[in-house]
């Protein structure tokens, strides 16, 4: 045990692990809120089994002196709530890991586990207070003490957190937290543990949200007033968040009987003049494809939040992937334009989701927001959001007697009316139609309508969000990523310390920004990084830029890249030698 470092500085990775139902989420919520209030940068993410009870789930809380919102393999402090937890994260345990475990319930442990194991007798303490349920507050109290959080601050927070409980329950949780502080003090004195992380008082005022909430906030900012969904992990968090905000922001939130109903409800809402969104995941979206094609021929705005998870079939329902890019790109039969956005940061999810409503209304097309399980379940503190620079456009006209819903225009965009607003008749159909919206089989009109819809692409490309270049523009090697991989690639890139290597992040993956080809053309070596087995974005880049992708770094086991893994694979791929 003499080799275990007792002092941890600047950046701490804390992992709490145990079976479902052990109360990991309670500990996580209490601790992260207190850490943020105390001025620490906090990042959290979780991985969990697709079962109600049993198995092993873990939460990683990264506490640092600067914002570092990316996953680590490294574990500085591990709190296993049962013996199975040690086995679950054993590949991440090193000789530098402090393990705070209740030895009484663990039985024999191997030499590697025993090396960093410190006795944390929370089970008996919880039983003495009133039952195993109070173990969560003991664990939270111990960890809060390790990070130097004032006990009075903990007490005030617990009063708020358990305010709807009976007075006896609140009192027992207060006793439990105090016991955690007491045990922690003994451990700190005996082991010499010290955590030294700079605090920033202004962080207490930061926003603390996860990816699902970021998408929901963006939807509200975009004027969303109708949401339809059939619950499916990992997209359900968006449905829950917007349902909770429905009354406050005038949103109709509808849990449909199935995904087919959900997508058609959304289209019906846009037809009636609402600003609507549907939220789903891969298997649910597969049922919505006919509705996407319907949106294409109707030229209806549509906003689709697609939270990716590993397929095919049910796949790994609670894990992460970037495997649905081509599903979104080619969904719906026939040719019609669409936009696909893929935020890499929570702030970006807010702004891009907001903008998705404006783009959908402006171009009268489906707009996709691609996230994934890792993204929607991760959270960190961010400064206040600014919506002042974006004004909502008036995208609905008052119709006249001679109104033609699909009037052929130079840019392909027809004035959009809605039933009951004006004198005109608003006709739409799932068949090909003439300018007035009436069904037609005139072959010349068919060509005219297809060409009209495709002409929107000219202005859509001009409006595309440019990729973000990280590093200097004097690069030889270009790392390319999209969506949720942004923070981990950026941190790994910074660890390389190479001025001849740059990172290009795409938050819009279709249509690509016109500058994309120039960025790729400059590089002598192009490396695409993504979370699927087929290098879907690499294929898209090749097709649209005619530039060769020299290598890919892919991951598709259901987990997100970690900083350490990304750094190692980058070094191997671009031939960096130690």
Image (cartoon, helix red, strand yellow):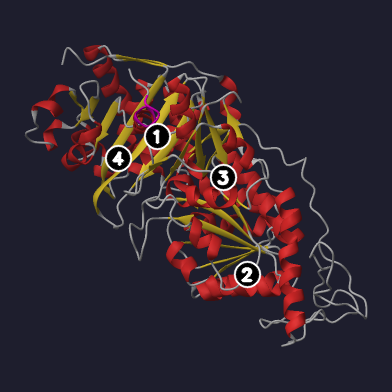
Are the residues at dot 3 and dot 2 in contact (C-beta closer than 8 Å)?
A: no
Q: Position of residue 16 (x, y in %)?
A: 30, 36
Task: Compute the Cα span from label 3 to label 2.
Answer: 25 Å
Crowding near pointer 3: few (<14 within 10 Å), some, many (20+)?
Answer: many
Q: Is residue 283 magenta?
A: no
Q: Sequence-wise, which precedes: disc 1 or disc 3? A: 1
**Residue assigned mark 3:** 343
Q: Sequence-wise, which precedes: disc 2 or disc 1? A: 1
Left or right relative to 382: residue 454: right
- Report the residue that reaches farthest toward the left: 108
Crowding near pointer 1: few (<14 within 10 Å), some, many (20+)?
Answer: many
Q: Is residue 572 magenta?
A: yes
Are the residues at dot 1 and dot 3 in contact (C-beta closer than 8 Å)?
A: no
Q: Sequence-wise, which precedes: disc 3 or disc 4? A: 4
Task: Compute the Cα span from label 2 to label 1.
Answer: 39 Å
| SS type, badge 3 | loop
Q: Main secondary structure of the magenta part?
A: helix
**Residue assigned mark 2:** 335
Front of the two marks 2 and 4: 2
């Amino acid at each position: 045990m003499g080799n275990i470092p007792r002092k941890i500085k600047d950046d701490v990775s804390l992992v709490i692990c145990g079976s479902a139902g052990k109360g990991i989420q309670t500990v996580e919520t209490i601790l992260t809120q207190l850490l943020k209030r105390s001025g620490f940068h906090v990042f959290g993410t979780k991985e969990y089994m697709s079962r109600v009870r049993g198995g092993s789930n873990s939460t990683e809380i990264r506490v640092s002196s600067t914002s570092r919102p990316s996953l680590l393999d490294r574990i500085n402090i591990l709190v296993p709530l049962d013996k199975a937890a040690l086995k679950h994260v054993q590949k991440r345990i090193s000789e530098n890991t402090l393990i705070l475990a209740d030895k009484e319930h663990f039985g024999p442990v191997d030499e590697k586990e025993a090396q960093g194991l410190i006795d944390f007798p929370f089970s008996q303490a919880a039983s003495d207070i009133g039952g195993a349920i109070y173990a969560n507050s003991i664990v939270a109290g111990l960890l809060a003490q390790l990070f130097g959080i004032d006990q009075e601050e903990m007490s005030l927070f617990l009063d708020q957190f358990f305010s709807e409980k009976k007075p006896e329950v609140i009192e027992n949780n207060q006793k439990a937290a105090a016991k955690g502080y007491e045990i922690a003090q003994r451990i700190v004195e005996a082991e010499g543990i010290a955590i030294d992380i700079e605090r920033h008082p202004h962080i207490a005022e930061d926003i603390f949200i996860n990816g699902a909430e970021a998408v929901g906030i963006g939807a509200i900012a975009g004027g969303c007033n109708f949401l339809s969904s059939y619950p499916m992990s990992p997209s359900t968090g968006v449905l829950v968040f917007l349902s909770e905000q429905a009354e406050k922001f005038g949103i109709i939130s509808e849990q449909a009987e199935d995904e087919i109903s959900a997508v058609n409800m959304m289209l019906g809402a846009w037809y009636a003049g609402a600003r609507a969104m549907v939220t789903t995941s891969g298997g649910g979206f597969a049922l919505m494809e006919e509705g996407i094609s319907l949106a294409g021929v109707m030229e209806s705005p549509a906003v689709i939040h697609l939270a990716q998870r590993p397929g095919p079939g049910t796949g790994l329902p609670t894990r992460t992937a970037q495997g649905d890019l081509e599903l979104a790109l080619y969904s719906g039969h026939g040719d019609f334009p669409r936009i696909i956005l893929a935020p890499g940061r929570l702030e970006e999810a807010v702004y891009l989701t907001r903008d998705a409503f404006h783009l959908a209304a402006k171009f009268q097309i489906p707009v996709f927001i691609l996230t994934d399980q890792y993204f929607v379940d991760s959270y960190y503190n961010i400064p206040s959001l600014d919506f002042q620079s974006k004004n909502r456009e008036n995208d609905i006209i008052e119709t006249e007697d001679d109104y033609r819903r699909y009037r052929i225009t130079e840019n392909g965009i027809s004035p959009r009316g809605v039933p009951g607003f004006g004198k005109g008749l608003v006709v739409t159909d799932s068949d090909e139609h003439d300018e007035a919206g009436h069904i037609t089989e005139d072959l010349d009109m068919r060509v005219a309508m297809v060409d009209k819809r495709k002409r929107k692409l000219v202005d859509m490309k001009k409006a595309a969000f440019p990729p973000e270049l990280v590093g200097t523009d004097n690069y030889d090697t270009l790392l390319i990523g999209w969506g949720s991989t942004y923070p981990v690639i950026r941190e790994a890139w910074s660890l390389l310390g190479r001025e001849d290597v740059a990172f290009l992040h795409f938050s819009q993956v279709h249509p690509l920004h016109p500058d994309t080809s120039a960025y790729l053309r400059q590089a002598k070596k192009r490396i695409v990084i993504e979370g699927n087995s087929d290098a879907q974005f690499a294929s898209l880049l090749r097709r649209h830029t005619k530039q060769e992708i020299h290598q890919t770094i892919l991951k598709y086991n259901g987990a997100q890249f970690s900083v350490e893994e990304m750094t190692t694979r980058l070094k191997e791929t671009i031939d960096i030698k130690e």
